[in-house]
Amino acid sequence: MLLIFVFGSIAVVSEFQSIKEWTLFGGGIFEAFVLIILCILTVVFLFTDYSRFRQTRNYLSFIHSFTGLLCLGLVFGHMIIRSSKDNSKTLFEAYNENIGIDGDFTLDFKVNNHLKGTRVDHFSTISYWGSYVKRGDTLILNIPLDFQMGRHAILKGNTMQFTDDTIHFNVYMR
């Protein structure tokens, strides 16, 4: 039970993070490893719990496999929700060449007030998820970042300028 609880907790916590770093070749190796182990443990416990249930006829025998299935459901459910938000229609993108080691940071503003940031640094890509509110030409960003950046921005033509920061973004309408 401890194994499935530990791997399930790690998988759920890592999936619900608002900041994810994907390293070489586009995948988080640690996160994939934990998810694979959780899937294997859940299948193994399904078989062992079923054999225990056949002997005792007690539904509490399925507590191990139910825990694994619950964690898998949370992880895959959140993946589907996040993917549908990420794939929704883009209102506009804001791009800055001076943020990050390689100087590539993009904010993707979706029509459903979903905000996705992407920063490319050498051999890794860091994704940030959050939301925004648009009031006229003013944007209020609610996105956790691992670096300092303003939260209030004003759209002026093809640029986005932060009121409490010196950062400027080029804006591309879609």
Image (tube, grey):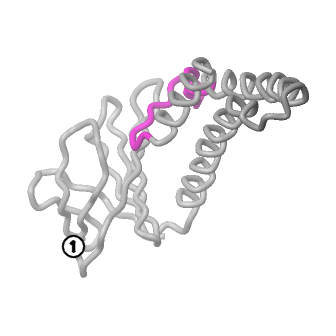
Q: Residue furthest top?
A: 3
- Image quadrant for the N terminus? top right
For label 1, count other residues whose C-alpha is less than 10 Å away and answer few (under 14), some (14-19) or many (20+): some
Image x and y of residue 168, in percent: 21, 55
Left or right placement of residue 142 versus residue 67 in this view: left
User: Relative to 27, does residue 165 appear above or below in the rendering?
Assistant: below
Question: Which element carries disc 1, helix, strand or loop?
Answer: strand
Query: Which residue range is magenta in the image?
Result: 17-32
Using the image as rendered, state which of residue 102 and residue 64 is in the foreground: 64
Q: Position of residue 61 (x, y in %)?
A: 75, 30
**What residue would you read off at disc 1?**
138
Residue placed furthest toward the bottom: 136
In the figure, residue 94 lies in which quadrant?
A: bottom left
Quadrant of the rendered image containing residue 31 = top right
Residue drawn 79% across the image and 34% down it: 58
The residue nearer to you, when weighing 50 against 80, is 50
Residue 152: x, y in percent?
18, 62
Magenta span contains residue 94: no
- 152 and 40: which one is in front? 40
What's under tag 1, amino acid-wise?
Thr
Tell me which residue sits at (36%, 60%) in the image: 131
Horizontal and vertical percent position of residue 127: 43, 41
Q: Relative to 90, is 24 above or below?
A: above
Q: Is residue 103 left or right of residue 126?
A: left
Q: How many marks?
A: 1
Residue 110 is left or right of residue 83, and the answer is left
Q: Residue at 11% of width from left, 61% of height from top?
A: 163
**Which quarter of the figure has residue 105?**
top left
Q: Pick whichever, 166 or 147, lies toward us.
A: 147
